């Protein structure tokens, strides 16, 4: 931030925008990392609960993760979508 009495020139404007963008992008990245960590923990929790107490767990047995991958295809974005969102394209 600049002092109240300091005049803003074009290069100062560009720098202020750059700094604001970098700060916000950094904060967004941290928020995304926290959200993804929590998401992964919740998914893991549900998998363990299902493996231990699921009514139909015997139907999947050793192939549980493969069954989940097939069953969750519609929930997972296509490969590359997340990377494009992060880049902003």
Image (cartoon, rainbow, N blue to C red):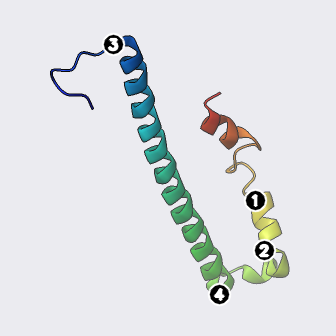
Gap in angstroms between the C-alphas marked 2 and 3: 61 Å
Task: Kindly identify which residue carries mark 1.
Answer: 71
Mark 2 burial class by Cα count in 10 Å: few <14, some 14-19, many 20+:
some
- Whole-percent x, y for residue 13 in the image: 37, 18
Mark 3 closeness class: few <14, some 14–19, many ≥20 residues within 10 Å: few
First-in-chain label (1 vs 2): 2
Q: Are marks 3 and 4 in contact (CB under 8 Å)?
A: no
Residue under circle 4? 52
Question: Which SS class for mark 4?
Answer: helix
Where does label 3 land, which residue?
A: 9
Out of 5 and 38, give the one closest to the viewer.
5
Q: Which of the two discs, 4 and 2, labels the residue nearer the N terminus?
A: 4
Number of other residues with Cα within 10 Å of mark 4, as a class: few under 14, some 14 to 19, many 20 or more:
few
**Residue at the bottom extreme, as displayed:** 52
> Which of the 4 image quarters holds residue 16?
top left
Q: Name the residue under label 2.
A: 64
- From this view, report whether residue 77 is shown above or below residue 51: above
Give the CA distance from mark 3 to mark 4: 65 Å
Which mark, residue 80? none
**Direction from residue 29 to residue 67 in the image, left or right:** right
Seen in the picture, residue 11 relative to 57 is either above or below; the reply is: above
For this rendering, which residue is in front, 31 or 12? Answer: 12
């Amino acid at each position: 931030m600049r002092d109240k009495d300091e005049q803003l020139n074009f290069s100062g404007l560009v720098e202020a925008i750059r700094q604001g963008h970098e700060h916000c992008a950094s904060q967004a990245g941290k928020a995304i990392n926290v959200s993804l960590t929590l998401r992964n923990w919740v998914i893991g929790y549900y998998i363990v609960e299902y493996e231990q107490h699921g009514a139909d767990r015997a139907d999947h047995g050793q192939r549980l993760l493969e069954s989940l991958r097939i069953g969750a295809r519609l929930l997972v974005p296509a490969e590359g979508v997340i990377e494009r969102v992060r880049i902003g394209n």
